[in-house]
Amino acid sequence: MRRTHRVSNPSPRWDVTVVGAGPAGSATALLLARTGARVLLLDRARFPREKPCSEYLSPESTRVLERLGKDVLAAVAAASPARLTGMKVVAPSGTEVVGRFETFSFALPRIRFDTILRAAAEAAGAEVREGVKVEEMLYDGGAVGGVVTRDTGLGTRDTYRSRIVVGADGLRSVVARRLGRVCTIGPRRIAFTAHVADVAGVHDLGEMHVGRPGYVGLGPIGGGVTTVALVVPQPEAWRSAKFFDELNRFPGVAGRFDARRTVRPLMATGPFARWSRRAVTDGALLVGDAADFFDPFTGQGIYSALRGAELAAAAILDCLTTGASLRQYARARRREFAGKWLLERLIGIAVGWPALIERVVGRMSRRPELVDLLVRATGNCVPARAALAPAVLAGLVL
Ligand SMILES: Cc1cc2nc3c(=O)[nH]c(=O)nc-3n(C[C@H](O)[C@H](O)[C@H](O)COP(=O)(O)OP(=O)(O)OC[C@H]3O[C@@H](n4cnc5c(N)ncnc54)[C@H](O)[C@@H]3O)c2cc1C
């Protein structure tokens, strides 16, 4: 049974404790600290830290970065990111289509991107503590009132009390598990990612190659380096042992990677998908992957983390200043993300059906405007509902 830690002192030192300094946590902390809120940002890792990801920021992420601060956007632009102008989707047979963004998207190593955001949160006034793992919640009269932590080096336990706790601790969020039911749903996949230099034929496109089974996502991240992810159903995890052989079974990838040019070894993550039934409770809320993560195929996770941070910060500020309920955050999330959730789910399921993808890519090769629409909808440049219109769905499969 879970232990319940109680607090009694009504005036905690912090207004908000943010658990996790990834994009969701750092952006939330930055936005709150900038208004003068007393923010504590905790992460079990020490930065700079790696994160398995395909490292593409969908085009609309640029707008959120700009809203986080011109200095934040300038720091990202100065970190030598690649600039992607669209996405290529390749069916199992090798048939391919290319959809273009209206603008471009940045792609850069997470070790750099996340460090920029973490530093921006600190510069905005958040107090950052690294090597601090959150293990339990503190409760005060039934509401969350802080966290219990363990120092990852010394092993010592500590408590931090705050008026609100934000769970931004990613896919296997401790905060989400402590707050309520975390649902895992199919398809259950795992991912293996690497960085490789001098990959043939990589220019200004992200690429998604669907195979039997699984898929590969790859793209430039600046400095002549390509990030590559192999995503397979969980029972196929053994395939990672022959990572580069596995890449060669995708017709559009075969022969392009030289294993000797690996610059960052293989990392694994998953299984996904999972989502939390309770993104908000008294005194706490979830943001980013801690709230929901379905499948990386559409590359929307970082945007969702950043945009979710904006929604979370707005609800928290309202709560701190007027006493309004945090539950408005759940409504704001539904309004903002309902279409995206559906699109992401549909695509995530479809890529498990190679014959369906073959058909859809075949249809798209004759209707380039549909490819652009789909790529822009997953890039958050146009509302997801535009791609979910019955006429569009019919055009993709019938
Ligand atoms: C294979 C793969 C490819 C992807 N490719 C893309 C892509 O190209 N584009 C895109 O937009 N998205 C992509 N995503 C999704 C994206 O990586 C996530 O959606 C994004 O990282 C979510 O950010 P976050 O801040 O919620 O979580 P995270 O980035 O996971 O950050 C969570 C932080 O919490 C910390 N933490 C965890 N537990 C604790 C604890 N108990 N106590 C304290 N700290 C803790 C961690 O150390 C970490 O720093 C991909 C995902 C996968 C798996």
Image (spheres, rainbow, N blue to C red):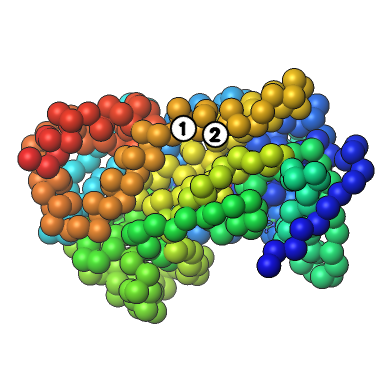
Residues 65 and 169: in front is: 169
Residues 148 and 64: in front is: 148
Which percent across, then down, holds residue 242? 35, 78
Which percent across, then down, holds residue 53? 47, 55
Residues 128 and 146: in front is: 146
- Report the disc number at residue 334: 1
- Looking at the image, residue 160 sits to the left or right of residue 87; the answer is right
Q: Residue at x 30, y 75 (%)?
A: 245
Please say whether residue 310 is visible from this viewpoint. Answer: no
Circle 1: element type:
helix
- Report the disc number at residue 238: none
- Looking at the image, residue 370 sits to the left or right of residue 30; the answer is left
Q: The residue under label 2 is which amino acid type?
A: Ala
Please say whether residue 188 is visible from this viewpoint. Answer: yes
- Quadrant into which the N terminus falls: bottom right
**For the residues bearing labels 2 and 1, Cβ distance under 8 angstroms:** yes
- Report the disc number at residue 330: 2
The quarter of the picture where residue 376 lies is: top left
- Looking at the image, residue 218 sits to the left or right of residue 306; the answer is left
317 w.r.t. 145: above or below: above
Determine the CA span between mark 2 and mark 1. Answer: 6 Å
